[in-house]
Image (cartoon, rainbow, N blue to C red):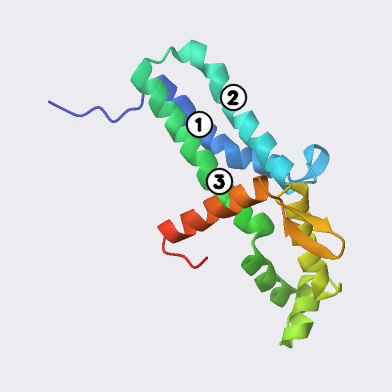
């Protein structure tokens, strides 16, 4: 008795859609199709990959196991791709490394920070990150003070703290 390692049509379509995700990201990164915002670019690329897979579902007529397998494969590729994308697009450590590369020589810590912020004061970085918290309604301004929003911010902070504790990370 042999083992059949050839994927069903539905699983093969899901695997092809997994490969389509980075191809879509690449296509949406340059030329006439370029999507400037990195977050929107990833969401559109993922939507295109999922839509391509969904378009194959009627033709492949998967059974329940193949359908679940296909969804799990594509979901895994989407999550793994997003993890890598966030590191490349917004990762602080990677961005600091690329700032050193742009400088092509040794820098003081202050010069390094200025290279990272592209000549803006280092507090520009903090204001940028604070803007993200404001946009997500996790924090707000009260006069000159920054405060956590009482429901959404507190809930997110509690959940993030619990996850850090669960995974042995400092709060």
Number of the front mark, 1 or 3: 3
Number of the front mark, 3 or 2: 3
Q: Which residue has dot 1 on it?
A: 16
Residue at 64 percent across and 57 percent down: it is: 88
Residue 51 image position (x, y, % from top left): 61, 24
Q: In this view, does 16 lie above or below 29?
A: above
Residue 27 image position (x, y, % from top left): 70, 40
Q: Between 145 and 162, which is closer to the camera in this rendering?
A: 145
Q: How far apart are marks 2 and 1 (CA)?
A: 9 Å
Q: Which residue has dot 2 on it?
A: 52
Q: What element carries label 1?
A: helix
Residue 25 image position (x, y, % from top left): 66, 42
Q: Which residue has dot 3 on it?
A: 81
Q: Is residue 43 above or below residue 109?
A: above
User: Sequence-wise, which precedes: disc 1 or disc 3?
Assistant: 1
Q: Is mark 2 on a helix, strand or loop?
A: helix
> Count the marks: how many?
3
Residue at 78 percent across and 67 percent down: it is: 125
Left or right for 60, reference 55: left
């Amino acid at each position: 008795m042999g083992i059949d390692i050839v994927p069903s049509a539905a699983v093969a379509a899901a695997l092809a859609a997994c490969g389509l995700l980075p191809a879509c990201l690449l296509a949406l990164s340059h030329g006439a199709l370029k999507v400037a915002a990195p977050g929107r670019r990833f969401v559109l690329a993922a939507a295109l990959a999922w839509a391509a897979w969904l378009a194959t579902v009627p033709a492949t007529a998967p059974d329940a196991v193949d359908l679940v397998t296909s969804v799990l494969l594509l979901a895994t590729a989407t999550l793994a791709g997003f993890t890598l994308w966030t590191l490349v697009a917004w990762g602080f450590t990677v961005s600091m490394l690329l700032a050193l590369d742009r400088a092509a020589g040794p820098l003081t810590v202050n010069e390094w920070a200025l290279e990272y912020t592209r000549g803006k004061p280092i507090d520009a970085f903090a204001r940028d990150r604070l803007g993200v918290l404001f946009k997500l309604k996790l924090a707000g301004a009260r006069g000159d003070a920054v405060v956590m929003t009482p429901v959404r911010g507190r809930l997110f902070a509690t959940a993030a703290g619990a996850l850090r504790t669960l995974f042995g990370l400092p709060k």
